[in-house]
Image: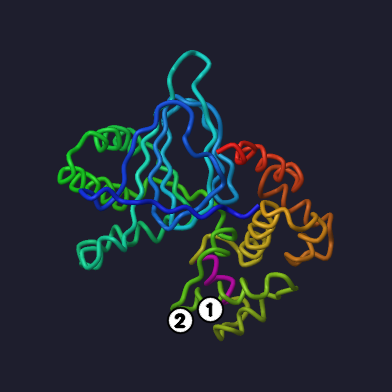
Amino acid sequence: MKPVLRSFSLHPERSFLVRKDIGAPVYSMWHQHAEIELFFIRGGQGGMMIGDKEIPIDGSSQMIVLGSNLPHTMSYGNQANGHVVEAVVVHINPAVWGAFYELPEMTPIRNLFKNTERGIYIKDDLLQQMETEMFALVDDDPPQSMIRLMQLLLTIATSQKYDYVASQGYASTHSRETDNSRMSKIYNYVLENYHRDISVQEVADIIHFAKGSFCRYFKQRTGKTFMDFLIEVRIGNACKLLMENEMNINEIAYACGYNNISNFFHQFKALKGCSPSRYQKNYFGYTKNEDND
């Protein structure tokens, strides 16, 4: 199932949208949108699907920042002990900010938005700080809300106390680098050829490295081996195809570069913690109410 494309209309007095939801979500469909989304939730039970990652909603405070056009859905309700779920949602379209967004002082925030292509999960003491700021944002008047938002984003950008959500492989299918850097050449080559056998040597040749030097370079830049990255890309794309539900699992395996089905199942479970069929069932479990929204 492909994500539904959503769009939002701005209030005349604001350059971004902010709202507070109490109770079950008003929109739980599998969807995407051009806007950056900040999502803070507390007191609920359910789950989120962000790209190819499942995240339980367990009643604790949680915050996700979603990049432009990263597919996602949230399905939750009140906790059984009577606590009412509360969520604050912010939608930002940097294009609305015009020349302001291109100012040199905005560089940390531009870099942060770049990092949200995979989604980021706020953690540690930064989460406590964001809880205060996100709920205060709802009650601010328009000028003060803009100041608070800039401070909030800058705090996240400079603290870097967050983890990535969707796999690098999945996110790469939605956003490709366009510069001529070595890493971009590697990423683009993998994204165009992951469906067939790729050797380390042929990728090393692209950036004119010896095989050993390439392996060290890639590990230093990414923290993982090239083959681990290739597996992430293949499994990430497999997740996308499972969600679209237009091919059977064997067809998906072959389309993602696997000639050995058992190897596909093994690598999928190692990365996702479940079989491809269970992953697909879990996904449709999150989006089961779609036709009613």
In-front residue for pair 288/196: 288
- Lateral position of residue 67 relative to residue 15, left or right: right
Residues at marks 2 and 1 touching, judged by CB atoms closer than 8 Å? yes
Q: Is residue 92 magenta?
A: no
Q: Tell me residue 117's x, y (percent).
A: 46, 58
The residue at which mark 2 appears reads as: 180
92 in relation to 98, above or below: above
- Tell me the tag on residue 203: none
Report crowding for label 2: few under 14, some 14 to 19, many 20 or more residues within 10 A (C-alpha): few
Disc 1, SS: helix
In-front residue for pair 66/61: 66
129 in relation to 101, above or below: above
Q: Is residue 214 magenta?
A: yes
Identify residue type, mark 2: Asn
The segment highlighted magenta reads: 213-220
Residue drawn at the location 44% of the way across and 44% of the way down: 121
In-front residue for pair 188/20: 20
Which badge, 2 or 1, is on the more N-terminal residue?
2
The residue at which mark 1 appears reads as: 185
Identify residue type, mark 1: Lys
Residue drawn at the location 53% of the way across and 78% of the way down: 185
Direction left: furthest residue: 143
- Lateral position of residue 234 relative to residue 155, left or right: right
Residue drawn at the location 37% of the way across and 58% of the way down: 113
Disc 2, SS: loop
Q: Tell me residue 48's x, y (percent).
A: 54, 39
Q: Main secondary structure of the magenta part?
A: helix
Q: CA distance from mark 2 to mark 1?
A: 7 Å
- Lateral position of residue 155 relative to residue 192, left or right: left
